[in-house]
Image (cartoon, helix red, strand yellow):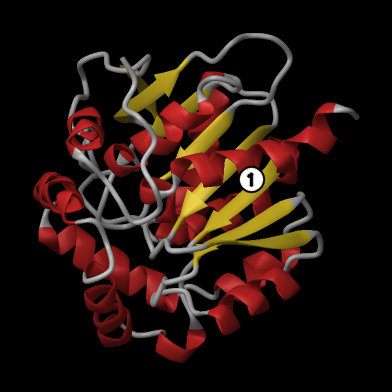
Amino acid sequence: MRPRPTAPGRFGPAELRLALAAPRPAAGLTSEWRLVDGLRTHTRRAPGPGGDVPPVVLVHGLAVSHRYLTPLAVALSSTHPVYAPDLPGFGLTEHPGQAYDVAGHAAFLAAWLDTYRMPPVCLVGHSFGAEVAAALAARRPDAVRALVLAGPTTDPTARSRAGQVARWLVDTLREAPLQAPILLRDVWDARPWRVYTTLSHSVRNPVEEDLARVTAPTLVVAGSRDPVVPPAWRCQVTRLVSDAHPVEVPGAAHNVATTAPRQVADAIRTLLAPTLRR
């Protein structure tokens, strides 16, 4: 039985069990491994209902993995095939010797798409994953049918490790407490040095340059209580992308894809509806 969707800002025991289930099958999600760019890569996936609908690929943030995106994967799986790969060194994917920067992760994700022989996808990136998704969409417009930037980093007014950590600490007070075991498991899997180095790459990444090159229809999604991605930065992101529209989820904080999966899934379906008619 699938967990009952919860209201924004909530995350209950059922969602926690689902997030920590991999590699065991749960709620229609299964795990598989493929060799991508020399790394044994884990992907959590749901087959979807079939038919001519675009796959949705979920890209996680810098300290985490597919786990916290499983509520959104389940919410989307009734209408779309969903894939949530673990990036190099995170989750259940093999650890490379170094921490990839944004361009490195984007190149890896492009190789992942090629390995799966994907048609153009709806690419959903959250937090640091939004930076990776924007970089891929800018470099491989042929591969990205639509783009979702959920809680995109990094706001230039806090573009430092200290600035981002300070905002993240504020966010922890606004998130559902049961998300903490997922974060602890993910940091343990990735190792703190990889998280720290990836954060350093994030705050040095000129994300504005990639955003200005994105041509795919785009949603900029954020929770109304997100301290990491304040309204002024969301507006700037929306202006930089040529075909972008903002979506604010009332009551949600930074982990909007985790605590408001139904609302985010509905926004994604609305984004994709015009492309399905083409």
* Name of the residue lying farthest toward the top: 50
Left or right: residue 61 compared with residue 145: left
Q: Position of residue 221 (x, y in %)?
A: 57, 59
Left or right: residue 210 compared with residue 106: right
* Name of the residue lying farthest toward the bottom: 157
Q: Position of residue 71 (x, y in %)?
A: 37, 36
Q: Position of residue 126 (x, y in %)?
A: 45, 54
Q: Quadrant of residue 228?
A: bottom left
Inspect this view and state whether residue 247 appears. yes
Q: Secondary structure at mark 1?
A: helix
| Location of residue 79 with respect to 180 vertically, above or below | above
Left or right: residue 226 compared with residue 138: left
Task: Name the residue: 20% across, 16% down.
Answer: 24
Task: Name the residue: 47% across, 90% down.
Answer: 157
Residue at mark 1: 267
Task: Name the residue: 23% across, 56% down.
Answer: 176
